[in-house]
Amino acid sequence: MALHHSTAHDDVDTSIGIPRTYAWIVFALTFGLLISDYMSRQVLNAVFPLLKGEWALSDTQLGLLSGIVALMVGLLTFPLSLLADRFGRVKSLALMAMLWSLATLGCALAENYQQMFVARFLVGVGEAAYGSVGIAVVVAVFPRNMRATLSGSFISGGMFGSVLGMAAGGFLAQHLGWRWAFAGMALFGMLLAVLYPLIVKEARINPQRAATAASKAAVALTRPLRTLYSSRSVISAYVGSGLQMFVGGTVIVWMPSYLNRYYAMGTDKAGAVAAIIVLCGGAGMILCGMLSDRMCRDRPDRKIALAIAYCLGSCALLSLAFALPFGMPQLVLICLGMLIATGTSGPAGAMVANLTHYSVHGTAFATLTLVNNLLGLAPGPFITGKVSDLIGLDNAFQLVPLISIAAAAVFFYGKRHYHNDMARLNGQSVDAKAGAAAQEIQA
């Protein structure tokens, strides 16, 4: 029998009292800052060839400059997300944006590798909790029946920011020098960081009646923090997503260098072509997420089957692509592979939302971000750079897609336990609500 998604703890609608127009303004500004986040993060990839030549850097050193940002995001996203919940999400988002923008400006002023490394370290600190806190703000201001679609769309902002960062960075680096590539990203982020708290107000995104409803429903499930790790399915969602991010994140970071070395493209053209490939990844997040919502309305477990299909499909396409000779057919297959390689973001996010209590969704997304960075985005570029120094970037890229097989295996393990985990979570929720109702009667 199919298990329908009817978890009691999804009953609270935190968007009550928030005008739809204002909700879309909040989404647009929060989405814009996410784009700035990834522009500042990924502009480095566009100037890899220039830094390598000017400072005589190895691929390992270049990979570390990219990986340190993801590492700090992974390590700090959880504690900083908890602080943001306590301190105020709007203030926290604005402070984060100002920090990563100033740090990106520091990259533009760096005189050597050590100074660049410190600046990139601070970029990672500033960006650490933005994704999890930003998505918590977006989810809170819209009705719950839009949650999956908006989550997928918001996460795709990372891809679009990467596109703009590499394309604009490559153009600025080619015509004005690599320092202006960093400076341009920094100025854009500072502008949005100043604008954000002037328009988005904490009081307006947390109306009193929604807060009251949430506080009454908070007793619906005992010890909600345990749902972050209490089921095999949710742990599988974290790990499977992280492993698949290893593939997509590595391709994004190293693609401009790949095009520069094997297609003899300048930084501007390499950045533009890489941007198209990354754009395919961003489109895949949205399209695969929409497909997941459409196919899985009455069968949430189908999301996991789709995630497995995305992993295996991307492995086949990217493996074939990097085995082909350099040329247009290879680039087309890379685009198709990236279109579905990023598709697991939607199903994985939906699994995490379904399997955790609504009151800790911000922390749940922080946990997902933590694993994505520690298993995928941080080690991917560094390990690939290490392998590239030994056997060449073209040969290293042939090995990267194989990680998707491990991701598919983890999702398959989670699928075997999904029905039981959902049933257990529903049972806990029903029992807890009965207890809460009894307490109200006694009061």
Image (spheres, rainbow, N blue to C red):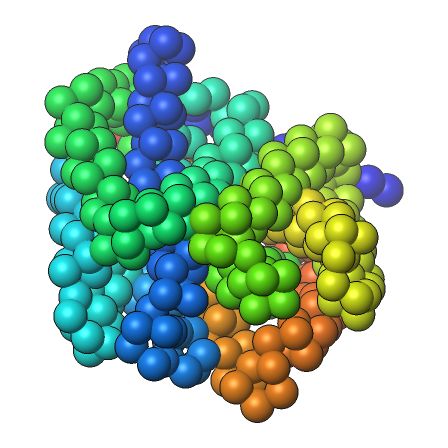
Q: Position of residue 165 (x, y in %)?
A: 39, 46
Q: Is residue 308 left or right of residue 123?
A: right
Splitting the image into 4 quarters, where does residue 135 fall?
top left
Q: Position of residue 246 (x, y in %)?
A: 56, 66
Question: What residue is at 80 percent from the left and 53 percent from the top?
Answer: 329
Splitting the image into 4 quarters, where does residue 217 fall?
top left
Name the one closer to the observer, 402 or 161. 161
Q: Is residue 166 left or right of residue 398?
A: left
Question: What residue is at 62 percent from the left and 37 percent from the top?
Answer: 283
Quarter of the C terminus within the rendering: top left
Splitting the image into 4 quarters, where does residue 403 fall?
bottom right
Question: What residue is at 34 percent from the left and 51 percent from the top?
Answer: 173
Q: Position of residue 311 (x, y in %)?
A: 73, 58
Question: What residue is at 24 percent from the left and 49 percent from the top?
Answer: 180
- Vertical position of residue 145 compared to residue 254: above or below: above
- Vertical position of residue 44 compared to residue 299: above or below: below
- Vertical position of residue 106 compared to residue 393: above or below: above
Q: Which residue is at the far right?
A: 1
Residue 309 seen in the current view: no
Count of numbered circles in the view: 0
Q: Position of residue 20 (x, y in %)?
A: 39, 10
Quarter of the N terminus within the rendering: top right
